[in-house]
């Protein structure tokens, strides 16, 4: 699901709508598995005479770990989006307090991307957008970064390299 049409301007169309790469969910998935395993061991190793107090403490600890290290990162991933339209790049993030940044395409001078070895293996990267007035804007963990880079450069510079007038034939 992309950005609602009420947030787009007149004659503005959505080109790409992306979330950050799912690699952000690897650590929460590992924490979930480890905390579920640890909770099972704690329940199994707790002496019966410590029940029910120990069971309640174990449950509260597991819920706190689950909310802090599993649910919160998942919600952060779910609410971080990047939308490329025919006029601007819209970034939105935030679970409780939402923040957004709109960058008009007309202000972008250069589009580059960076990829670490892990990013190359996973097929993602960081998009670096240079403007004349500000520090470079970086969009981290963009999935399929090379395709996004090509789409951006075509939107920004696609017609710039074509001559306005066809050169005359040399035969004439």
Image (cartoon, rainbow, N blue to C red):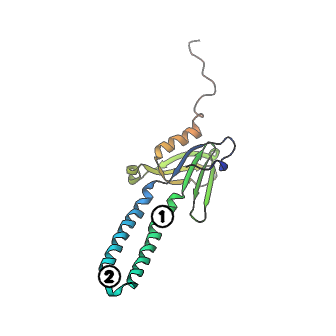
Q: Which mark is residue 152?
A: none
Apparent side of residue 90 relative to residue 41 in the rendered image (left or right): right
**Where's residue 86, x and y in %?**
62, 42
Q: Is residue 159 above or below residue 68?
A: above
- Specify which label sits upstream in the sequence, 2 or 1: 2
Crowdedness near tag 1: few (<14), some (14–19) or many (≥20) residues, C-alpha within 10 Å: some
Q: For marks 2 and 1, give the CA distance.
A: 30 Å
Q: Residue at x 36, y 84 (%)?
A: 51
Apparent side of residue 64 relative to residue 44 in the rendered image (left or right): right
Which residue occupies the extreme right position in the image?
10
Crowdedness near tag 2: few (<14), some (14–19) or many (≥20) residues, C-alpha within 10 Å: few
Q: In front here: 91 or 126? A: 91
Please name the residue that numbered disc 1 is placed on.
73
**Where's residue 97, x and y in %?**
61, 65
**Image quadrant containing the C terminus:** top right
Q: Residue at x 48, y 42 (%)?
A: 147
**Where's residue 156, x and y in %?**
59, 40
Identify the element where label 1 is drawn. helix
Q: Which mark is residue 46?
A: 2
Apparent side of residue 150 relative to residue 4 in the rendered image (left or right): left
Asked if the residue under mark 1 is in contact with the one under mark 2, i.e. CB atoms within 8 Å, the reply is no
């Amino acid at each position: 699901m992309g950005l609602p049409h009420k947030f787009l301007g007149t004659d503005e169309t959505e080109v790409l709508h992306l979330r950050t790469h799912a690699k952000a969910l690897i650590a929460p998935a590992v924490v979930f598995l480890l905390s579920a395993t640890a909770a099972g061991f704690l329940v199994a190793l707790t002496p019966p005479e410590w029940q029910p107090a120990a069971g309640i403490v174990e449950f509260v600890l597991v819920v706190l770990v689950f909310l802090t290290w599993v649910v919160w990162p998942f919600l952060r991933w779910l609410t971080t989006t990047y939308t490329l339209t025919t006029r601007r790049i819209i970034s939105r993030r935030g679970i409780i307090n939402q923040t957004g940044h709109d960058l008009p395409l007309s202000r972008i001078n250069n589009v580059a991307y960076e990829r670490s070895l892990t990013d190359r293996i996973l097929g993602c990267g960081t998009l670096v957008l240079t403007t004349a007035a500000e520090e470079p804007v970086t969009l981290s963990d963009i999935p399929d970064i090379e395709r996004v880079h090509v789409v951006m450069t075509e939107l920004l510079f696609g017609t710039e390299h074509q001559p306005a007038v066809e050169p005359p034939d040399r035969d004439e």
